[in-house]
Image (spheres, rainbow, N blue to C red):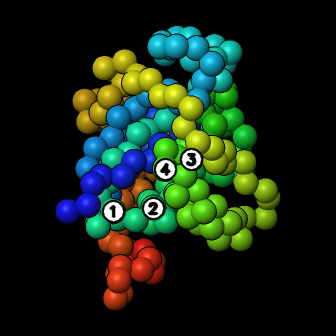
Amino acid sequence: MKPMKEIYLAGGCFWGTEHFLKQIEGVEATQVGYANGNIANPTYQQVCTGTTDFAETVKVQYDPDEVDLPFLIDLYFKTIDPTSLNKQGGDRGTQYRTGIYYTDTADLPVIRETVDRLAANYSRPLVVEIEPLKNFYLAEDYHQDYLDKNPGGYCHINPALFDLARKAKMKKEGDGEYLNLEK
């Protein structure tokens, strides 16, 4: 078995983004936290001031034998408005920006190619950050698995998308080449 890979995805409020991503077959673990900011060990209250440069982000650990990065990004894009700067759903502020943060530089061309392909579906320019992960601090415990602990809690993501994530299967052909989503 290959070692797990990781990617960090910011998609607005991390409660719904985490709940969505953890439904995907091949995602082995998720944690919510704050990425790419300018202070050490931020609190939720500090991040909400908009002065720390942090984005609410989900750390995703996944099995590359079960799910590949283009497939994860395709699904992630179903939960965001990639043309909306610092706003997803009713949430506004720099902490709610969208971003893909990587730790493996080999992932960058894959991320760019996937985002460029998806950009063709939009009439406005995309504002999704694509950057190396500079730092990541875990959010407070009450934020972890929030929607599991608080069913019916606030979420900017359409609940039907959780079902899509549970049912989505990555089709493979031959060497496991990415094909498309099966719904």
Q: Could you tell whether 99 is left or right of 138 in the image? A: right
At a point 33% along the width and 62% down the height, the residue shown is 64
| Mark 1 or mark 3, earlier in chain | 1
Q: Which residue is mark 3?
A: 100
Image location of residue 129, percent across then percent down? 66, 45
Q: Please identify, in this view, whether the residue under mark 1 or under mark 3 is nearer the observer.
A: 1
Q: Amino acid at mark 2?
A: Leu
Give the structural element (helix, strand or loop) at label 3: strand
User: Label 3 near label 4: C-beta < 8 Å?
Assistant: no
Q: Which residue is mark 2?
A: 69
Tell me the CA gap for discs 1 and 3: 17 Å
User: Label 2 near label 3: C-beta < 8 Å?
Assistant: no
Tell me the CA gap for discs 2 and 1: 8 Å
Vertical side of 131 occupied by 142: above or below: above
Q: How many other residues sit within 10 Å of disc 3, few (<14), some (14-19) or many (≥20)?
A: many
User: Label 1 near label 2: C-beta < 8 Å?
Assistant: yes
| Mark 4 or mark 2, earlier in chain | 2
Q: Please identify, in this view, whether the residue under mark 4 or under mark 2 is nearer the observer.
A: 4
Tell me the CA gap for discs 4 and 2: 12 Å
Tell me the CA gap for discs 4 and 3: 12 Å
| Mark 3 or mark 2, earlier in chain | 2
Q: Which residue is mark 1?
A: 64
Check the image and name the residue furthest to the left. 1
Image location of residue 11, percent across then percent down? 54, 42
At a point 78% along the width and 64% down the height, the residue shown is 123
